[in-house]
Amino acid sequence: MTQTAATTAATGQEPTESRPARRIHRAWFVAAVTFVTIIGAAAFRSLPGLLIDPLHDEFHWSRGTIALAVSINLALYGLTAPFAAALMDRFGIRRVVALALMVIAVGSGTTVWMNSAWQLMLCWGLLVGLGSGSMALAFAATVTNRWFTERRGLVSGVLTAASASGQLIFLPLLSWIVTEYRWRPAAVTVALAALAVVPFVWLLLRDHPADVGLKPYGAKEFVPKPEPVPGAATRAVRVLFGAMRTGPFWLLAGTFAICGASTNGLIQTHFVPAAHDHGMPIRAAASLLAVIGVFDVLGTIASGWFTDRFEPRRLLAVYYAFRGISLLFLPFLLAPSVHLPMVFFIVFYGLDWVATVPPTMALCREHYGDDSAIVFGWVLAAHQVGAALVAFLGGLARDTFGSYEVVWYASGALCAVATLMALVIRRPRRPVDRARGALAKA
């Protein structure tokens, strides 16, 4: 059977060669839908820090209790990620993402009727955590790998930055809603944002280029759609156990756990209430957090450029060292109004926010070869577990000590530990062979 005939039999459509050439490849539309979808899902990532004080004032729940719900969400966001790609391989990207968006909408929307802390854990922690975790980096990576053979770095970078863009778009809006109309309309806004994206996903997103008779962007040959892979989740667990037998995995997971603790768990969750403790209006503090999202994009792109030219472990050490130093100065910068030193902190922290991702991914590739994507998924899970712990402990510390000062200093010390851990990571002499040998024993 010829390639054309095989393609027609597999897809029911003629491949692209027999059709008029399109000026814009369908892959770019799929990437655009993915970008909008991640932005819609990122609405919830903007909300937790804005609601700690309103929920505390209305229900008299401790900040530790509220932060526990945030920590459940952050932990599930990370722990779901290694299995999200397996679900997409088994059931398709479109179905998994559409269902995840609806779960986020239900979890956020039903919080308006809650009156007990366990309901916050269920709706805000469990449901939204599972939904958002299903659209973590695995979603962006799966779309990039299936639809592109060229420009993968560009596409993956842009899609990774979509979460920061979502934070930029929704933080000022949600902070205005919370200030003017209390927290319930803000929760409904997040639910509606998630639901609004579902039709675009269902109508425009496709699981594979072969579904529409196309080659991946930049491919020279037609790529048939692979069969569903029911054993992908088992492989993810097998690779985890193999990686756990190697030293670099623990060092990478440990540094990335501290990364999550000092970003999502600390700044994203507790910066707004900490600034509000010092008299800064919630809208002003939320706007500063949104600015972090702007410089986050620039920092990620720059870090990728540096990673191609400098040793990744040294970059990680520099990033964590400067992050730790900046956190030690933060207690002296918080004030009722925005001033120049605080703006400098926000810009610097934004540039450093996910600058750790490109060198961490590069080190995973060096040590684990073909299994590096799965290993990075588990390292990302450690990132979110670290974020979850600090989100909870930060709220508990605020209840215990009456301020966040001890949290800033402790996080600065953790970043110093991450600096040393990054420097201990050694480059393997034969990366691919070593990775295969280590993981094959699992």
Image (cartoon, rainbow, N blue to C red):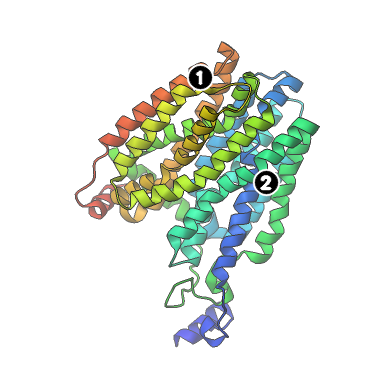
- Above or below, comparing residue 22 to residue 414 in the picture: below
- Above or below, comparing residue 249 to residue 118 in the picture: below
Q: Classify 10 Å Cα crowding around label 1: few (below 14), some (14-19), many (20 and above).
A: few
- Describe the element under mark 2 as helix, strand or loop: helix
- Describe the element under mark 1 as helix, strand or loop: helix
Relative horizontal placement of residue 371, taking residue 51 as reference (left or right) = left
Nearer mark to the viewer, of 1 and 2 = 1
- Above or below, comparing residue 255 to residue 131 in the picture: above
* Front residue of 426 and 332: 332
Q: Position of residue 191 (x, y in %)?
A: 72, 44
Under mark 2, the amino acid is Val
Q: CA distance from mark 1 to mark 2?
A: 41 Å
Q: Which residue position holds label 2?
A: 103
Under mark 1, the amino acid is Phe
Which residue sits furthest left? 429
Disc sitting over residue 332 in the figure = 1
* Front residue of 62 and 228: 62
